[in-house]
Image: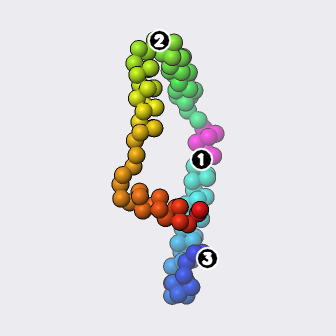
Amino acid sequence: MSLIPEKIRKKSRQSLQDLSEEVREDYLLSVKKAIVDFVLRDSRDAESEKTAEKVADYKLELEIVPKPWHASFERARYDVTRNLHTINPCMCQLLLLWHTSFK
């Protein structure tokens, strides 16, 4: 409420109270819904956790598979990080502002 200008607070006091009450009611409803959802968790959630474990095993197997493109990818990534420069005028102004303000 402290972020709302005083002028607006004085003019629409009732509206602000109504909005505050609405936010409180929505929050309480969400908390109650979350509690009920947690207590009454469906058995399908347990099944989805099991399938997630199967996917994790699958990903582990993929890490072992040889990747012939990996070395060239890493080389290209290194070249890009060392040689690619941002030339957007906005970025140049932002960098100038940063150096003048915080150096």
* Image x and y of residue 71, in percent: 44, 20
- Residue placed at 57% from the left, 70% from the top? 21
Q: Name the residue under label 2.
A: 65
Q: What's under tag 2, amino acid-wise? A: Val
Q: Which quadrant is the C terminus positioned in?
A: bottom right
Q: Which of 66 and 61 is in front in this view?
A: 66
Task: Estimate the spatial distance between the alpha carbons at disc 3 and disc 1, rounded to whole Å.
Answer: 30 Å
Residue 91 place in picture, x, y as percent = 41, 57
Q: What residue is pinned by disc 3?
A: 2
Label 2 element class:
loop
Q: Indicate which disc, 1 or 2, sits on the residue closer to the N terminus.
A: 1
Mark 3 Cα shell of 10 Å, populated few (<14), some (14-19), many (≥20): few
Residue on which the image places disc 1: 34
Question: Looking at the image, which residue sits at the far left?
Answer: 88
41 lies above or below 57: below
- Residue 55 location (% of width, % of height): 50, 21
In the rendered image, residue 11 lying in the magenta stretch gets the answer no
Q: Spatial distance from mark 3 to mark 2, Cα to Cα?
A: 58 Å
Which of the two discs, 3 and 1, labels the residue nearer the N terminus? 3
Helix, strand or loop for the magenta stretch, by majority: helix
